Image (cartoon, rainbow, N blue to C red):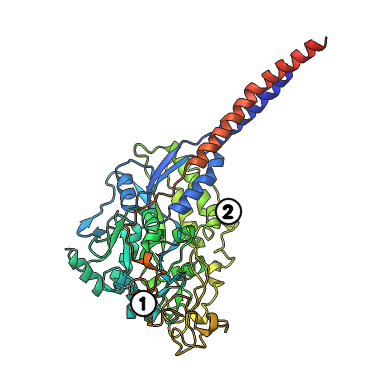
Amino acid sequence: MRKLRWIAAAIVLMVLGQSTAFAQGYVPISGAGSTWSSNALDQWRKNVGQYGMRISYAATGSTDGRNQFKAGQVDFAVSEIPYGLTDAGVTDHAPADRGFAYMPIVAGGTSFMYNLHIGGTRVTNLRLSGATIAGIFTGAITTWADPAIKTDNPGLTLPARKIIPVVRSDGSGTSAQLTTYLASQFPGPWDAFCRRAGRATPCGFTSNYPLVPPVVGQSGSLGVTNYVRQDQSEGSITYVEYSYARNAGFPIAKVLNKAGYYIEPKATSVAVALLAAAIKPDLTQELGGVYANPDARTYPLSSYSYMILPTTPTSPFNPDKGRTLSDFAYYFLCEGQQQADQLGYSPLPKNLVQAGLDQVARIPGSTKKPTDISKCNNPTFSPDGTNLLAKNAPQPSPCDKAGVTQCAEGTGGARTPTPVSNRPGAGPGTPGGTNPDGTPAGPGGTSGTPSGAPGANGPANGAIDPDTGLPINGQNLAAGGTSVPVSLDQRDNATAALLTALAVALLLGLVIGPPILARRLSGEEGGEK
């Protein structure tokens, strides 16, 4: 019995000892801000939990994160927007009594996730030019059958369904990224939209998207994602970091770059695009060169996200918190970047990792680790300092070039191809349509037109529902129904609660089980005597 108790005690002490060792020297810290980069941050926070670091992060939007940091309510913030910019006539002033620095944490692409079908087939290969995107998000383009969208998508016959542009209703770095692009590249339609919203022009960038028809507002990246992903949200489109569309299993639009190719925001295309970013002395970004990057592999709406770090020990931040924050930053600037691609982002290049490490050393209480940057295993690093990820990025497919062809392959989180009509001069229903590899684009040489879609074997009179693109017959009466999309929260804490309960049960079993077993064994031994 004593032996069993000693074994149980040793196990418990070992578990408690490991927990104490992991937690030694670390105190919890908190942050708030960007939803654009929160998928990466959440994974990194989970990863460092094994070392005893407890980092809480509230993805409340870049604007709220900056405000909370300014008020001393959080230890760090994450934002795509620096302090000091004027938004809709209001200047977002930097904290007056709190030293801070900007540190790039991850790169990525602001993508356009959508929900659209041709008949019963989901569209996964949509292409949009910047001018078309500007038209959609300013209300100038209102249906998916618009000629501008047809020009972008010569291989598709899209339905005359109403477009539902879904935007952020909260202060958002993602909104700032999109509107900075619109103000730079398409100031005419953007200013006209702002005037309709009662804003002064030139409008410039804004983190608070004008909520005037036809746009629909939703809070947070999860909010806009969950709105678009619902069946009731057919025809909707939103702007969100690439990671969200991949996680939701939904496609994103390929965007036309300056070289005349429609490109998806994969890690490689983002890395290529950001070779043209201008990095200011405070490490913030200027993206005019990215929008105009002539490389055929570039994704135009690529950018960096930033952590706002404290550089002075102002209450409630102290050196003990600085120890935790610095070690967390050392982790994600090196090891964490290795996961960027699989999380839907693009890793930082070597120059920004090195600059980030220099910023970490400025945190009060920083551990100032002598990090060997050459051992980070970052996929962008190379011996000569060039961005290896960008250098090895593949050239786009010929079918991604603007013109009469269109790739069939799916995008984002929806990789299933969408049949297309790709032979020059071939339209829907024209025999001879082919895919990029030369195979027939659809059954019976119909240029990929799905059964039940316009131009397929529909009713003899050819009547088509102008809203859905479906043949008018007894098969699709439900398509005329209406419903109001609602946001769904995808968070589920059941798994965490179950694991916690199992851990508690195991610990109790280790403590209580051996004495009970010992008494039973003792009783059995007494009965044998």
- 2 or 1: mark nearer the eye: 1
Q: Position of residue 404 (x, y in %)?
A: 44, 86
Which label belongs to residue 464? Answer: 1
Q: Is residue 522 left or right of residue 358?
A: right
Q: Position of residue 162 (x, y in %)?
A: 31, 69
Q: Is residue 519 left or right of residue 221?
A: right
| Callout 2 secondary element | loop
Q: Is residue 41 left or right of residue 506?
A: left
Q: Look at the image and tell me whether residue 284 can be seen.
A: no
Name which residue lies at 40% across and 70% down.
474
**Disc 1 marks which amino acid?**
Ile
Name which residue lies at 50% across and 60% down.
347
**Disc 2 marks which amino acid?**
Asp
Question: Circle 2 is placed at which residue position?
Answer: 372
Which label belongs to residue 505? Answer: none
Viewer-closest of 243 and 292: 243
The crowd level at tag 1 (other Cα within 10 Å; few <14, some 14-19, many 20+) is many
Viewer-closest of 108 and 314: 108
Q: Is residue 164 above or below residue 439?
A: above
The crowd level at tag 2 (other Cα within 10 Å; few <14, some 14-19, many 20+) is few
Q: Position of residue 110 (x, y in %)?
A: 40, 64
